[in-house]
Amino acid sequence: MTDHPNEPTAVVDAFIAAIERSDVTAAVALLAPDCEYDNVPMGIVHGPEAVAAILRPMLAGCSEVDWPVLRQSSNGPIVCNERLDRFRMAHGWVEVPVAGVWEVHDGLITLWRDYFDETTYRNQLPPRAEGN
């Protein structure tokens, strides 16, 4: 595989591998300039810089990131996967089942949409101290 894959499934796999390394720069290099990231329960942003602004603080709080893909299929530029997004934080692992929909054109991700249950995520976080 080259430094920059072109086939849609390989592009998504490379993006996930970059996330697992906490390499935001490598991950966003796989995004089209007008990429839409729709983190369904939390909102939509556009462009690599906006995606990086979400990923950097999210990954900074983790000592390890593991996004095993449980199932994945593709049809032309569309890639769909079922993952278990795992984040090792100071208090332990947070694990969130995720369904992802990706669209890849000319070797760049133009759409990244993740569906997950926000309550499942938040229930695994430590309680917030009063006043925070």
Image (spheres, rainbow, N blue to C red):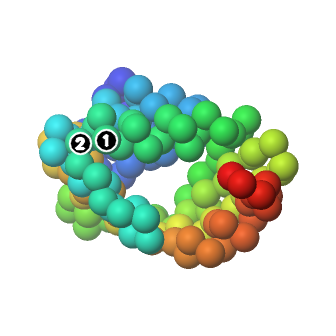
The quadrant of the rendering that contains the N terminus is: top left
Label 1 secondary element: helix
Q: To which residue does mark 2 refer?
A: 47
Q: To which residue does mark 1 refer?
A: 50
Q: Which residue is painted at 45% across and 31% down in the image?
A: 24
Number of numbered callouts drawn: 2
The amino acid type found where label 2 is placed reads Gly
Q: Which residue is painted at 43% across and 65% down in the image?
A: 42
The amino acid type found where label 1 is placed reads Ala
Q: Are marks 1 and 2 in contact (CB under 8 Å)?
A: yes
Q: Which residue is painted at 17% across and 38% down in the image?
A: 33
List x then y, in percent, for residue 9: 36, 52
Label 2 secondary element: loop
Residue 70 is at least partly visible in this image: no
Residue 42 is at least partly visible in this image: yes
List x then y, in percent, for residue 41: 44, 71
In the rendered structure, find residue 124 and report the number of the disc placed on it: none
Based on the displayed image, in which of its 4 quarters is residue 115 positioned? Answer: bottom left
Query: From the viewer's perspective, is residue 117 above or below residue 110?
Result: below
Is 24 on the left or on the right of 97, as rendered? left
Is 65 on the left or on the right of 2, as rendered? right
Identify which residue, 88 or 70, lies in the foreground.
88
Residue furthest to the right in view is 91
Is 77 on the left or on the right of 121, as rendered? left
Query: From the viewer's perspective, is residue 18 above or below residue 81?
Result: above
Q: Which residue is painted at 81% across and 42% down in the image?
A: 90
Q: Give the CA distance from mark 1 to mark 2.
A: 6 Å
List x then y, in percent, for residue 131: 71, 54
Based on the displayed image, in which of its 4 quarters is residue 128 positioned? Answer: bottom right
Crowdedness near tag 1: few (<14), some (14–19) or many (≥20) residues, C-alpha within 10 Å: some
